[in-house]
Image (cartoon, rainbow, N blue to C red):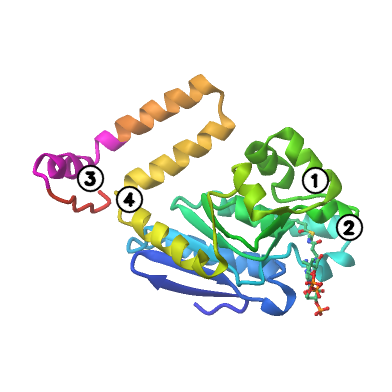
Amino acid sequence: MSYEYITVASDEAVGVITLNRPKILNALNLQLINELVEAMEQFDHDPSIGAILLTGNERAFAAGADINEMADASAVEIMKRDQFAVWDRMSRISKPIIGAVSGFVLGGGCELMMNCDIVIASETAVIGQPEINLGVMPGAGGTQRLTRAVGLRKAMEMLLTGDSISAKEAWQYGLVNRVVPVEACFSEALKLAKRISRQAPLAVQVIKKTVHKAEDLPLQEGMDYERNSFYLLLASEDRKEGMQAFLEKRKPRFTGN
Ligand code: HXC
């Protein structure tokens, strides 16, 4: 499959997707998002892939939705495009998505970052939701995921001022996992993605899904969901292999069954 606005590769069991519209800071037009989700779904269905790494370039992860594409479109046109439906598909990807972000991570770029399960940020990352400066607001989760990630007051400040925060501040608020020098960002993220891709595939996917339930469900329902997921994994071959390998003091050989 060939893409215009992204590049796709694999490294061991990691599927690597790079946003590739560098001239306009990886602005997210509809085609780019469609290509991105298509590539993610392909990796999701590929049994040789255990984790997905999503990145941009040093200057920008993504500077937001493509303003050219939105500037003249009417509300009805944008509604009919139903452009956020494809974002919903992204949140149903079952394998973990590791983000490696540098430079501008703005608007839809920040929302894309928040779709990642783990984020390694460069010291150079500048993260924010500047939509208010354009007279609009986020539409792909910026008010919801940011508030869950950093808390109401910080989210309110970022969304109402449009001011960006540094990678370090994002880390202090738990919005990114780790801040590293720009030259180490991709390799750190790849190392982490490779580690995760070697874990038992079913456990990885069930844990991802169950952790996300913590954002949606009341605690007791979440606990019930967790317990049922736990029982489900007990039925897997990999559970037998994992426990047997521990007892035999050897490395497990997980098969995803
Ligand atoms: C289209 C964009 C763009 C964008 C940058 N460019 N961001 N084009 N959409 N979101 C283009 C510029 O027009 C310019 O093109 C080139 O990229 C380089 O950008 P400069 O502005 O020259 O670079 P710089 O001075 O370094 O400033 C970088 C910047 C600024 C601070 C990131 O570009 C900026 O403020 N961009 C807009 C950020 C933003 O508002 N994002 C939110 C979008 S709304 P030319 O042709 O002049 O070289 C949104 C809604 C989300 O995301 C809804 C869900 C999808």
Give yes or no for residue 130 being in the magenta stretch: no
The residue where tag 2 is placed is 134
Residue at position x 41%, y 29% from top?
A: 226
From the top left corner, tell me how far across and down residue 170 is, in percent.
64, 48
Q: Which of the pair 65/187 is nearer the observer?
A: 187
The residue where tag 4 is placed is 201
Q: Earlier in the sequence, mark 3 or mark 2?
A: 2
User: Hey, what amino acid is under mark 2?
Assistant: Leu
Residue at position x 71%, y 57% from top?
A: 108
Q: Which of the pair 248/115 is nearer the observer?
A: 248
From the top left corner, tell me how far across and down residue 25 is, in percent.
71, 72
* Tag 4 and tag 3, C-beta contact below 8 Å: yes
The residue where tag 1 is placed is 159
Which residue is situated farthest in the top direction here? Answer: 220
The residue where tag 3 is placed is 238
Disc 1 to disc 3, C-alpha distance? 44 Å
From the top left corner, tell me how far across and down residue 103 is, in percent.
66, 66
Q: Is residue 24 above or below residue 50?
A: below
Q: Earlier in the sequence, mark 4 or mark 1?
A: 1
Does ligand 1 reach within 8 Å of label 2's beta carbon? yes
Q: Earlier in the sequence, mark 2 or mark 1?
A: 2
User: Hey, what amino acid is under mark 3?
Assistant: Asp
How crowded pointer 2 is (Cα within 10 Å; few <14, some 14-19, many 20+) is rated as: few
Q: Element under label 2?
A: helix
Q: Which residues are magenta?
A: 233-249
* Tag 2 and tag 1, C-beta contact below 8 Å: no
Q: Give the total number of marks visible in the rendering.
A: 4
Residue at position x 76%, y 34% from top?
A: 153
Q: Is residue 86 above or below residue 187?
A: above
